[in-house]
Amino acid sequence: MKESLKYRLNYFIYQAGVMFFPYIALYLKDAGYNSIQYGAVMSFTPIVIAFTLPFCGLLDKSGKGGKLLAAIFSFVMITAEWLIIGFDTLTAIVTAVFFASAAKAALATSLDNIATVYCIDTGHEFSKLRSFASFGYIAANLAGAFLYDSLGFRAILIISSVSMLLFAAGRFGVKRSVSDFKYTKKEPDYRLLLKNKAFLLFLAYQIFCFAMLTFNNHYDIIYQKVRELPSYIFGITTMIRVGFEILTFMFLTKTKISYKRMLVAAPVFLIIQSAAYFFWIPTFFIYFLMSFAGIGSGLIIFANNKYLNKIVRPRNITAALYISAVVQNIFTGLATFIGGAAIDIYGIRYLYLGSGILLSAAFLITVLFIKNEKDFSGSVLLR
């Protein structure tokens, strides 16, 4: 089997393995928990991911790190899933989400890291591998949305568990590229990285844009439930959003748009979803406008790792990826917790007013401060 196909299959199967995450909040809501409680549980995922990532980075520095992660954390994920319904208390659910989130951090970031370096080493287009995560996300959420209404949360957990076992087996079959070993033999220069103004500005952009993209997605299913829409609507809107994300990947691979222009355009498209949810538009128009959210997420996912590769040294790529992910997840977790507490006071639609304001800040930061990647060509950062 071709190595690139192994990466594609791993991305696809991984999404089926974590398909239960969006439905945890819905499960809690249907079980009678209030918005502060399920908002707190939802915020656990990004916060735990943020604090787990440095540990994942240490494991990933060894040649067997990725395979060790796959074996250990796949088992942790499966155990955590069944803890959620095996002990139907808020304490058990919080504990389960804690361990499942740690496993998610380890598995997803490790896979993204080795895929990024593999693409650098072989010249493969990263989005062509990463798009299979989008295909998997569509399939998982379509299946999950219908399963939740017809068979319940337990059926979703069964499919997730089987998929996670398959992911662990498939992850053992992926070889690390030559450059991956070359980069991990060199210690990253954190001092240089944290003095890199382009990198720090990009972190600010990610706080406002990438974090708000995740925040909107976290509350998407709750928003639709508040509007008394059936669960399968979430599957359909997800299919539309991620479908346009994939189409955006395909378009961008055939064009020569600068990464800065992609970063500028991303929050503009994402604001459309925030505005549509705030103004409580009819359901029919939500289907149409979710395509803009998909284009926005496609732009930022496509440009994110590529832009980082332009503004930091090769030896610092892995460190930059982990730092970016930590910052995004901490901010997303805080925003998700605050959002849960604010729903009972202001209503869920005002969460999207807040995300729209922060996405506008991301747009201004990019226009005013983010440099074009061509400005770094031949600079000291790349020597």
Image: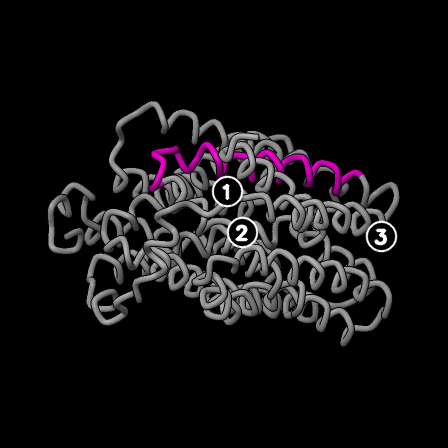
Tag 1 residue: 273
Q: Position of residue 162 (x, y in %)?
A: 77, 47
**Residue under the image location 67 percent in, 35 percent down:** 139
Helix, strand or loop status at disc 1: helix
Tag 2 residue: 216
Query: Which is nearer the N-term, disc 3 or disc 1?
Result: 3
Label 1 crowd (10 A; few <14 / some 14-19 / many >=20):
many
Query: Which is nearer the N-term, disc 1 or disc 2?
Result: 2
Could you tell me if residue 323 is visible in this image? Answer: yes
Q: Position of residue 322 (x, y in %)?
A: 41, 61
State which quadrant residue 10 falls in: top right
| 92 or 31, nearer to the observer | 92
Label 3 crowd (10 A; few <14 / some 14-19 / many >=20):
some
* The residue stretch that appears in magenta: 120-146
How far apart marks 3 and 1 lie (CA) works out to 31 Å
Tag 3 residue: 154
